[in-house]
Amino acid sequence: MTLRIGNASGFYGDRFDALREMLTGGELDVLTGDYLAELTMLILGRDRLKDPGAGYARTFLRQLEDCLGLARERGVRIVTNAGGLNPAGLADAVRQLADRLGIPVRVAHVEGDDLTAAHPGSLAAHAYLGGFGIAECLRAGADIVVTGRVTDAAL
């Protein structure tokens, strides 16, 4: 069995057109996007201080708005750590976007990396989870999997 995987992002703020380029540049089964670096975690932590519902890479939503139909049409599943400090919040935002666009997709998210409560006074404290949650979401039929901190290689 061959699994064709592409990657469209290496950091928060990477090339906006990369998602579309990967979807139109050849056959893919899964498209990943890595948005999290230590500096990004700081930025998302500050965002969350201003708005507890924030804490995820908002640019991912703008990219997805432009490309969700194309990904669905081509049968490409998307896995991203753009959920940052709030994977559930981004997953909900993706569902709302898909509903608004009229594109049926199954969205799942992985949580468990947030250790901030165990470290009072920290802006953010997150553990790398690995790829097990991602694999479980994909096996369960998710079209889009949103995570927080997993590992760069796990994506």
Image (cartoon, helix red, strand yellow):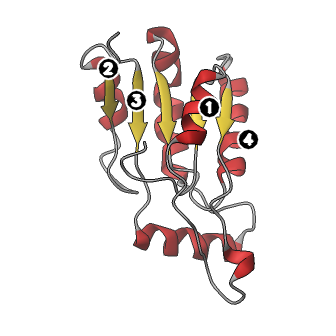
Q: Which residue is mark 1?
A: 136
Q: Is residue 49 left or right of residue 41?
A: right
Say whether disc 2 or disc 3 marks the residue closer to the N-terminus: 2
Q: Nearer the viewer, mark 1 or mark 2?
A: 1
**In what element is the residue under mark 2?**
loop
Spatial CA distance of label 3 from label 4 is: 20 Å
Which residue, given by chain and number where applicable, does mark 3 sit on?
Answer: 31
Which numbered disc, 3 or 1, marks the residue that appears first in the sequence?
3
Is residue 110 found left or right of 70 in the rendered image? Answer: right
Identify the secondary structure beneath mark 4: helix
Q: Nearer the viewer, residue 137 or 41?
A: 137
Q: Quadrant of residue 98?
A: top right
- Disc 1 or disc 4, which is closer to the eye? 1
The Cα–Cα distance between marks 1 and 2, rounded to whole angstroms, is 18 Å
Residue 29, horizontal then vertical, whole percent: 40, 18
Which residue is tagged 4? 92
Q: CA–CA distance between discs 4 and 2?
A: 27 Å
Q: Spatial distance from mark 2 to mark 3, Cα to Cα?
A: 9 Å
Q: CA distance from mark 1 to mark 4?
A: 19 Å
What's the amino acid at mark 4? Asp
Q: CA distance from mark 3 to mark 1?
A: 17 Å
Dot placed on the residue nearer the N-terminal end, 1 or 4: 4
Q: Nearer the viewer, residue 50 or 28?
A: 28
- In this view, the mark in front (3 or 4): 3
